[in-house]
Amino acid sequence: MSLLDWFADRRKTAPALRPTPEPDEGDGLWSKCPECGEVVYRKDLIANASVCASCGYHHRIHSEERLRILLDPGSFIPVDGELSPTDPLAFKDRRAYADRLRDSQRQTGLRDAVVCGTGTIEGQGIALAVMDFRFMGGSMGSVVGEKITRLIETATEQQLPVLVVCASGGARMQEGMLSLMQMAKISGALERHRSRKLLYIPLLTHPTTGGVTASFAMLGDLILAEPKALIGFAGRRVIEQTLREKLPDNFQTAEYLQDHGFVDAIIPRTQLRSRLASLLQMHQQPAAVSA
Amino acid sequence: MAPRRLLLDFEKPLVDLEEQIEQIRQLARDSEVDVSQQLLQLETLATRRREEIFSSLTPAQKIQVARHPQRPSCLDYIQLLSDDWIELHGDRSGSDDQALVGGLGRLDGRAVLFIGHQKGRDTKENVARNFGMASPGGYRKALRLMQHASRFQLPVISFIDTPGAYAGLKAEELGQGEAIAVNLREMFALEVPVIATVIGEGGSGGALGIGVADRLMMFEHSVYTVASPEACASILWRDAAKASTAAEALKITARDLSQLGIVDRVLGEPSGGNHWAPLQAADTLRTALCEELNQLASLSGQELRDQRYSKYRRIGRYLEHPEMEAAATSDTLESSASA
Ligand SMILES: [Zn+2]
């Protein structure tokens, strides 16, 4: 099947949001927690937002599952779903970038590492971007940059708050400096959104690192994180090489960042939807409406 | 003669010629034979060889030039460009980063803010300057100064020369990511002209943290990278020795980046690189800065902000409707690769 046919096929079947198993485990009926070893019925795990009921371990989830957990059913309206990557540098490392893209697209059913759109959380409108770590490590190239920028621009026009669910290894090296510049582009869009006194909340999930941390992940009016998510600018190994000493065990966890003042609140995924609904509600005071 | 220059490995073909020239000079002094003809020939040859070598540098060789310890640094340019320079210190939160400097000065009579990464010339200086790798406090100092400049209508002149933002325990604890991120956002709000120039190496987010500008200029042999070729090679090739291959693939040269729509103006260098003729390099820089500042001078604060946003808004390559564009895709890829 050609890529083109595959896209055509997918369009017929795609829109339905259905619960999907976590990517890091099989499709069986039962699931074993990598943290505590507890074996649970997969349906129960998914019903609990893919959080282990006995130890609280947060399984990694797809963008589709994230949307299902966060939004009112049927409220999601995707935008720019067709926007697709090219290979501007004709990049090839051990494999060609074009091949890596094709594989990721096949495996995920996505065109790139972010899904964007609008929806409601307990009836309150929001513009939402969800990064998907399965797609080349959630790396940010031109498509991720363009889609998030357009989303923020739409939100600015429509006076909507923005939520970006971050999950990324950073800038996508295969698009070179075009990737780095997406950090600036998105930050510029956020500056315009902010100047209208609109609310922006990044949710930092496991992992949020590199260029994403050095741009939109850290620009929230409120910065939220999932428990134990890895969040950092530089890689742990790089820092260990620089320092030649061991780093603290909880280094670059959500809890560590909160201790150092860079995360407003750590919210378990099971409470995320209701907490977000409250926060959105509290920022809807008539006085907060932009002048 | 200028002080002895460190020659890079690819300059070795010049070493023999230089030695011959030196020998003939010696001979002339000792014997009073007229060797001016031979000398002229050899010097012409040496110049031509140098031009040949420097007109076809590979990206990996440009990195060596960009990192040359004698390449003019941020403070060198400021001394050469500015009549009345006063360095300003501190982030007002407990630190004064030596790897990122800033202050006020005059450029052709006009008061401006200079900021830039500062490397050292030798080991001792480099330790003090942390090899030009700025800490969160450095980015916050830069932001404080840029916002000051915006309030008092002083154009911002930024010099980029860093291997990257400092990667260390302290830097993470103090919010390296947050410090850079806030600069990216707030540089879009500055209501004065901002001109950034990559004078040496531009290393990733650490460079961009003072690099959001109305005009991005780059010296001919400077490089600007999304990730250092060494890191890129070890991640993507799983082999740090593939750094020069990575340097090639990442498109890091001034010419590549102007073709990608990222760099607005490429500044020529004297043959042999800026460290062969720092005064000439400073003149080139002064001329370009003044021309760009004059062009931007007529714009209001809001116009500058709008145009700055539009400039970054355009950066990126993607397909809007791949099905429709599928037939044209291969052409697009070829044209962007060879463009
Ligand atoms: Zn568990």
Image (spheres, helix red, strand yellow):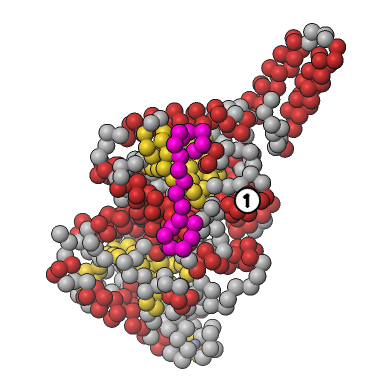
Residues shaded magenta: B77-96
| In the displayed structure image, the side of residue A81 where residue A97 appears, left or right | right
Residue B92 inside the magenta-drawn segment: yes
| Subunit bearing disc 1 | B
Residue B73 seen: yes
What residue is pinned by disc 1?
A: B126
| Residue A267 placement (x, y as % from top left) | 37, 80
Quadrant location of the C terminus of chain A in the rendered image = bottom left
**In the rendered image, which quarter is residue B93 located in?**
bottom left
Q: Which type of secondary structure does the marked residue at label 1 adopt?
A: helix
**In the rendered image, which quarter is residue A203 located in?**
bottom left
| Front in this rendered view, residue B23 or B184 | B23
- Which residue is depicted at the point 69% across and 31% down? B3
Residue B5 inside the magenta-drawn segment: no
- Which residue is depicted at the point 81% across and 14% down? B28
CA neighbours of label 1 inside 10 A, class few (<14), some (14 to 19), many (20+): some
In the rendered view, would you say A36 is above or below B335? Answer: below
| In the displayed structure image, the side of residue B157 where residue B152 appears, left or right | left
Magenta portion: prevailing SS class: loop
Quadrant location of the N terminus of chain A in the rendered image = bottom left
- Which residue is depicted at the point 31% across and 50% down? B189
> Number of marks in the image?
1
| Residue A31 placement (x, y as % from top left) | 49, 85
- Which residue is depicted at the point 63% across and 65% down? A243
What's the amino acid at mark 1? Answer: Asn
| Front in this rendered view, residue A6 or B66 | B66
| Residue A47 placement (x, y as % from top left) | 37, 85
| In the displayed structure image, the side of residue A22 where residue A247 appears, left or right | right
| Front in this rendered view, residue A290 or A33 | A290
Q: Is mark 1 within 8 Å of ligand 1?
A: no
